[in-house]
Amino acid sequence: MNNNIFKHLPNIIRASLEGDKRTVELATMTIIRKLKKEDPSLSDELANILTTYGAGAPLTRSLGIDPPPTDKETFLSLVKISDNSILDEEIFLVDETKDDVERFVKERRVMGKLLSYGIKPPNSIILHGPPGVGKTLLAKVLSNRLELPLITLDLASTVSSYLGKTGQNLKKVLEYAKSTPSILFLDEFDAIAKRRDDPTDLGELKRIVNVLLKELEDWPNNSIVVAATNHPEFLDKAIWRRFDLKIEIPLPDEKVRFKLWNKQLDKDITQLSEDFIGFLSKSIQNISPADIKQICEKVLRQVIVEEADPKLVLVKILKESYATTIPNFNKVMITEMRRSFGKKITQTQIADILGISVSTVNHHLKSTSNINK
């Protein structure tokens, strides 16, 4: 059996004894993927167990940290805690962003050396970029690589309509995260760190920003705070300056898109060539990793359940959602389908897939044929 599977056993046993069902589920899913080729029957048996048994439990005991703070009135937890030690999800970043992240990880791993020279190690990052580019996943990856629990602020339970209550809840969360080595993740950061010159603010916003400014200034070296926002322009300038690193995560470039399509379109299921993956990566430009993953999962489901052709499914999905973002979409897709399927696909079938007339298909094929002569 693959030795990589055995490394998950301590986490599974510990999590089982502590009643941490979520970690058991994640570790089991990782093992299922690794066993799929080597022992498909065992892989299927484990998958069947997961489909018939729910998962989810607190992690504080297994992580050896105190129970999280709660709201006094609602008794709801103000944070969510996750153990990412067995995270089996890879993140793909453009080169510049990747370099920034690698440098941060390296500096954190040698923070003792930095401190011995009287140099403060970086302990705060603000991530900004469009929705779906992987800001939350990056926080999990940092948690995994630095072997620290991830404490995520729960905005729903922290933000209160009572005057002063949100600031009190936030202070509880910040003090909790500072009390133990961890990564505090403040998602949708602009919701609590907006500019203090906002004309709609009645004073509560200023108090919240002042709390953040003070706490971030004194953040301990053994913990990290990671904030994420889709709207950096809304943040208070003083807050912005408190972070050691400001990392932009843009939409993926062609190289990263190729890696994403190639990973998500499981070749064991789709049998798609790298030429076709390259065509997708080049043609569809303004797309997030989250969108790519969603499209690929839809394709894989249809291929497995309906035994559909993955290329045809992809073309249909792209037609529905991305036709306006690809120049000459119909012409590009007609050419690609003919190149991929040859005479196996008729002009009528191509017309049905794209929702256009047969004469339009015929015209595009003839013009392409004339160009190639």
Image: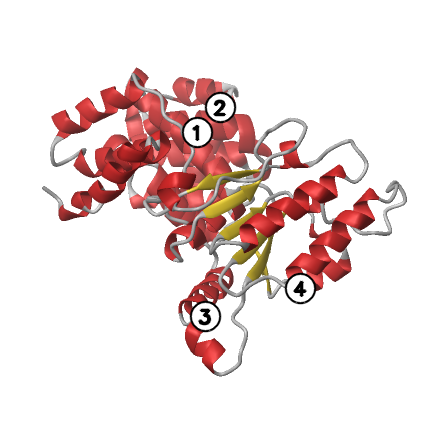
x, y (%) of residue 77? Answer: 57, 33
Residue located beneath label 1 in the image: 315
For the residue pair 256 and 101, the one nearer the viewer reads as 101
How packed is label 4: few (under 14 Cα within 10 Å), some, or many (20 or more)? few
Residue plotted at (55% across, 51% down): 177
Q: Are dots 2 and 1 in contact, CB under 8 Å?
A: yes
Between discs 3 and 2, the one toward the N terminus? 3
Depth order, front residue of 205/269: 205
Separation of marks 2 and 1 at Cα, in angstroms: 8 Å
Q: What is the CA distance from the residue labelled 2 to the residue labelled 4?
A: 57 Å
Residue indicated by mark 3: 107
Residue at far bottom of view = 117
The kind of residue on which mark 1 rests is Val
What kind of element bears circle 1?
helix
Q: Distance of mark 1 from mark 4, alpha carbons?
A: 51 Å
Which quadrant holds the N terminus?
top left
Q: Which of marks 2 and 4 is nearer the N terminus?
A: 4
How many neighbours does mark 1 have within 10 angstroms: few (below 14), some (14-19), or many (20 or more)? Answer: many
Q: Earlier in the sequence, mark 2 or mark 1?
A: 1
| Quadrant assignment, res 321 | top right
Residue type for callout 3: Glu
The disc, 3 or 4, on the residue closer to the chain's N-terminal end is 3
Q: Mark 2 points at which residue?
A: 354
Label 2: state its secondary structure: helix
Secondary structure state at the residue bearing disc 3: helix
Mark 4 residue element: helix
Identify the residue position indicated by label 4 in the image. Answer: 217
